[in-house]
Image (cartoon, rainbow, N blue to C red):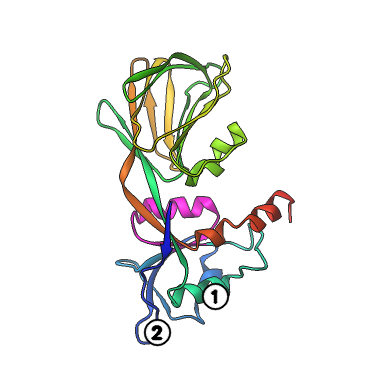
Amino acid sequence: MDCKRTELAAATPDKPIRAVLCGRHLDDLRHLLRDFPVVEVEGNPDVVISHGGDGSLLGAERDWPGVPKCPLRDRRMNPKCPAHPDERVLNLLVRGELRQSRVGKLVARTADGRELIALNDLSMSKGIVTSSVRYRLWLDDELYKGQIVGDGLVVATPFGSTGYFRNITQSLFRVGIGLAFNNCSDQVNHIVVDRRTVIRTKVLRGPAVLVADNDPVRLDLDEGDEVTIVQGEHETMILGLDIFRCRECYSLRQNGV
């Protein structure tokens, strides 16, 4: 992730920030925004403010791809870090002082032209709960494993490594693309490959299902279907990601505060 200061100009009462609001309990967010030079719009926004957790941010990116995002945690559902109250974050936003993070995405394409785009991760899992999925894996057209048997495969971005990838591997990574092998019959260690790597998998025995992030859209895969996964050309900008994912906030959540 390439981090810089935001390119958004500081807002003024005469020239407020145009924002689309996404997520949960938006009336709470609207109440907060009354004290700031931010106007809610339905189109052509300067920024999208997501209110909730990681899922709200992912949904905001699906609905408004490429538009800068400013994520705020919903205090009803998520513990708030005392050092980062919403009022402080919004004040930094309107002053143009939030840190900017550019985050890459993954693109998955099937041979028949179906496509999914993920900010967090792509997950191929078994289509029948009681049956494993068997698949073959190539990295840059070099065979990595002739057959993997298990619950599936998770391919994650650094941004998404705090999700399913971490749950499976108990680890994180900062650069590249991570592959986590979920509940394999033979032990297969997770790997992190260069972001330019072309990942290709073929279903040897299905059915299997491919999903991206928390998107309800799913791609059904049958025996013989192949999926190619690469890092996409486009990035999204997230404002205040360092605050949204501060370690103190994670510590509060893990301790049930």
Q: Amino acid at mark 1?
A: Leu
Residue 198 percent across, percent down from the top left:
33, 30
Residue 215 sits in which quadrant? top left
Residue 6 percent across, percent down from the top left:
40, 67
Is residue 235 depicted above or below 94 in this figure? Answer: above
Q: Nearer the viewer, residue 23 or 194?
A: 194
Left or right for 160, reference 236 = right
Left or right for 151, reference 95 = right
> Would you say residue 59 sits in the magenta stretch?
yes
Residue 63 percent across, percent down from the top left:
37, 54
The label nearer to you, 1 versus 2, is 2
Q: Secondary structure at mark 2?
A: loop
Left or right for 220, reference 111 = right
Tell me which residue sits at (54%, 20%) in the image: 188
Question: Which residue is tagged 1?
Answer: 32
Q: Secondary structure at mark 1?
A: helix
Q: Which residues lie in the magenta part?
A: 49-71
**The C terminus lies in quadrant:** bottom right
Tell me which residue sits at (58%, 38%) in the image: 166
Q: Amino acid at mark 2?
A: Thr
Q: What is the spatial separation of the Cα atoms under label 1 and label 2, in whole angstroms?
A: 17 Å
Question: Which residue is tagged 2?
Answer: 12
> Would you say residue 255 sits in the magenta stretch?
no
Q: Are marks 1 and 2 in contact (CB under 8 Å)?
A: no
Going from the N terminus, do you reach mark 1 or mark 2 first?
Answer: 2
Residue 10 percent across, percent down from the top left:
40, 78
Residue 48 sits in which quadrant? bottom left
Tell me which residue sits at (57%, 14%) in the image: 186
Q: Nearer the viewer, residue 236 or 13?
A: 236
| Category of crowding for the residue at label 2, using alpha-carbon neighbours closer than 10 angstroms: few (below 14), some (14–19), many (at least 20) | few
